[in-house]
Image: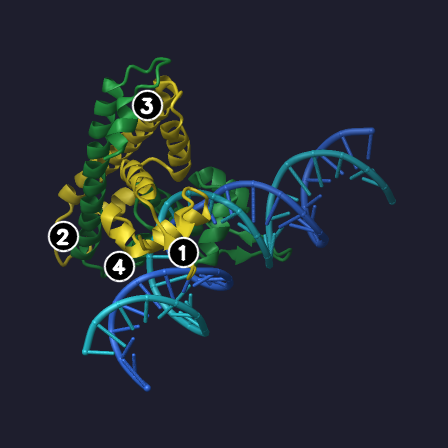
Chain colours: A green, B yellow, C cyan, D blue
DNA sequence: ACTTGACCTTCTAGTCACTGGAACCTTTAT
DNA sequence: ATAAAGGTTCCAGTGACTAGAAGGTCAAGT
């Protein structure tokens, strides 16, 4: 299968798939004309990658998860450790953003937002 | 004032302040020896910048906010529009992360996390 | 046979907001 | 006189793509 069809099936742009090959996440075969030739196994792997990325795993996490996915003797504890760690990071990020949003929405609430120059948002940003 | 002292006062690394000069956010004076020389006004401006950045405004947003901050005739509506827009973006990001976290914590909950290879997380990532 | 258009290839460079490091200069304290 | 701690510039790297250029290939229609 050619790269664009694969992209459509797994929901990734062709550019991204080429990039994943560049950094060694997948190694598609090559047809006689030099085109990349993807098997169902490649598609399966890319689906896994796309899903892991969409859950916010870093490309390096994905590399580790892929290795575990392909290792029939893996311990589920290893996978769980990566996932839990990532979950903790996401939750930290959410908390940080919620702090930001709270501060910001206080500022926005206090600002008349009219034609006058007086602005509590700018005052708040002064520290 | 020298760059490191300024950095300590506003909570930014010297490198970052130099970078802000590079991209035209501030223009400190120069002493005879070539060192940057920051006035209280520069410190004030950097404090504003640091605070806006810590609330997640992009550097370009900061540029706009700075211009409004320094414009005595600004309309508070202009500031409010930037802030509201940014707030909406943060909230979108939070929602996305919460989706991720929910999916991920389901997967983590279902995984025994022991020495066996059977792993619902990897299964979940297959799509 | 020829052309058109859609696909494929590689390569370079840009994104964002810094950050690290090298090579070198100035100030301050001992 | 020297050493440490600061300052300067410039170049390169981060993460995960993305845009674009220059060119090769393929399938369909005339």
Q: CA distance from mark 2 to mark 3?
A: 43 Å
Q: Secondary structure at mark 1?
A: loop
Q: Are marks 2 and 3 on the same chain?
A: yes
Q: CA distance from mark 3 to mark 1?
A: 41 Å
Pick whichever of labels 3 and 1 is earlier in the sequence.
1
Front disc: 3 or 1:
1
Q: Which residue is mark 3?
A: B84
Q: Which residue is mark 2?
A: B113
Front disc: 1 or 2:
1
Q: Quadrant of the C terminus of chain B?
A: top left
Q: Chain of mark 4?
A: A
Q: CA distance from mark 1 to mark 2?
A: 61 Å
Q: Secondary structure at mark 4?
A: loop
Disc 1: CA contacts within 10 A as few (<14), some (14-19) or many (>=20): few
Q: Is residue A27 visible?
A: no
Q: Secondary structure at mark 2?
A: loop
Q: Which residue is mark 4?
A: A72
Please report the residue visible at 32 percent of the width from the left and 55 percent of the height from the top. Answer: B2
Q: Which mark is residue B31?
A: 1
């Amino acid at each position: 299968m050619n790269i664009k069809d694969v992209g459509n099936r797994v929901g990734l742009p062709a550019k991204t798939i080429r990039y994943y090959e560049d950094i060694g996440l997948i190694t598609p075969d090559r047809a006689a004309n030099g085109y990349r030739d993807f098997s169902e196994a490649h598609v399966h792997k890319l689906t896994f990658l796309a899903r892991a990325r969409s859950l916010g795993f870093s490309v390096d996490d994905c590399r580790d998860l892929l290795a575990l996915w392909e290792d029939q003797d893996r311990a589920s504890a290893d996978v769980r450790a990566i996932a839990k760690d990532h979950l903790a990071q996401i939750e930290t990020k959410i908390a940080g953003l919620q702090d930001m949003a709270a501060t910001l929405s206080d500022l926005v609430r206090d600002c008349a937002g009219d034609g006058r120059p007086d602005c509590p948002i700018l005052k708040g940003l002064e520290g």
